[in-house]
Image (cartoon, rainbow, N blue to C red):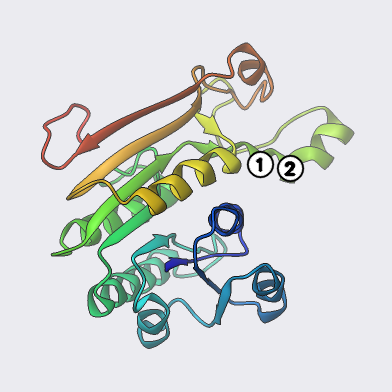
């Protein structure tokens, strides 16, 4: 059994579909019964509830050979870091109490930095919580920004010919499609062939994308780029 958090979301939905197609038993966790019903018809075991509730999550994780973990977030929250801390603590408590052996955790490029990264700083804190778990092997997928974020800007791009963001226009950003993340995560959840706390960076195409020209680099190189490091292997930059 493999439990997938956010099973109706950008990455979780695709991971669930890949696992089901591969013949795996999947427990799909989410907040919407109607959206989970689609996965139930495909063969998944639905679990509807609030991920900040440790009792709910512990039951959803119990008996699972592996868990896909992500951190749902609301950037409009008046207490973003507090919400993320409470959610992160709930997830770690549930992993420990359910005795989960392997966890694939979606993180972000920059999560190795303790400050100065905006929203990403909450993922740094969560990685530290996961590192402290005894008896659980963690694979942290530090992904680049999702290509799908440009969908939210399509109206502005079409009407005004610009892409508005808080990122410097010429900053080079590693970007990756959610489908590529799902492929890596699903394979890892099935293989469960790592030990300790391991980081794998998912950087998408070999060249980065700039907000000024979001399509420029994607067409220049389609070859995937990634790197892996372990808590047992010294590396710079640090994992």
Of residue 122 and residue 95, the one placed in the foreground of this image is: 95
The image's mark for residue 151 is 2
Q: Is residue 11 left or right of residue 91?
A: right
Residue 36 left/right relative to 99: right
The answer to which of 51 and 84 lies nearer the viewer is 51
> Where 86 falls versus 166 (above or below)?
below
Residue drawn at the location 42% of the way across and 71% of the way down = 83
Alpha-carbon neighbours of circle 2 within 10 Å: few (<14), some, or many (≥20)? few
Instruction: State the residue at coordinates (65%, 22%).
Output: 212
- Give the quarter of the image for residue 92: bottom left
- Taking depth in this image into account, of 122 and 126 the one nearest to the observer is 126
Is disc 1 surrounded by few (<14), some (14 to 19) or many (20+) residues within 10 Å? few
Looking at the rendered structure, the secondary structure element under dot 1 is helix
Give the answer, above or below, for where 209 lies relative to 3. Answer: above
Spatial separation of the CA atoms under disc 2 and disc 1: 6 Å
Residue 206 place in picture, x, y as percent = 49, 18
Callouts 2 and 1 close, C-beta under 8 Å: yes
Q: Quadrant of the C terminus?
A: top left
Q: Quadrant of the N terminus?
A: bottom left
Q: Quadrant of residue 6?
A: bottom right
Task: Estimate the x, y position of residue 124 in percent, counting from the top left.
Answer: 30, 51
On the question of residue 113 being in view, the answer is: no
- Residue 239 in the image: above or below residue 128: above
Q: Tell me: 198 left or right of 37.
A: left
Query: Most extreme residue toward the top, as rendered?
Result: 220
Residue pointed to by mark 1: 148
Residue 71: x and y, percent?
44, 62
Secondary element at image label 2: helix
- Name the residue at 66% across, 16% down: 219
x, y (%) of residue 74? Answer: 54, 64
Which residue is at a point 33% across and 37% down the rendered structure image? Answer: 200
């Amino acid at each position: 059994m493999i439990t997938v958090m956010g099973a109706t979301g950008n990455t979780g939905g695709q991971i669930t579909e890949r696992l089901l197609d591969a013949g795996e038993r999947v427990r799909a966790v989410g907040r919407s019964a109607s959206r989970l019903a689609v996965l139930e018809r495909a063969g998944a075991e639905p679990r509807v509830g609030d991920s900040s509730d440790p009792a709910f999550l512990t039951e959803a994780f119990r008996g699972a050979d592996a868990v896909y973990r992500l951190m749902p977030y609301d950037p409009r929250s008046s207490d973003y870091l507090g919400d993320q801390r409470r959610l992160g603590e709930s997830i770690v408590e549930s992993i420990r109490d359910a005795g989960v052996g392997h966890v694939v955790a979606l993180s972000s490029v920059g999560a190795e930095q303790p400050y100065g990264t905006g929203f990403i700083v909450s993922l740094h804190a969560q990685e530290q919580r996961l590192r402290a778990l005894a008896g659980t092997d963690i694979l942290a997928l530090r992904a680049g920004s999702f290509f799908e974020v440009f969908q939210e800007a399509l109206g502005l791009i079409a009407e005004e010919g610009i892409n508005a963001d808080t990122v410097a226009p010429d900053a080079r950003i590693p970007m990756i499609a959610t489908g590529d993340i799902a492929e890596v995560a699903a394979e890892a959840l099935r293989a469960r062939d790592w030990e300790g706390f391991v980081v794998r960076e998912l950087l998408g195409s070999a060249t980065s994308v700039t907000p000024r020209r979001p399509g420029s680099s994607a067409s220049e190189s389609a070859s995937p780029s990634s790197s892996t490091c372990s808590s047992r292997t010294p590396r710079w930059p640090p994992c």
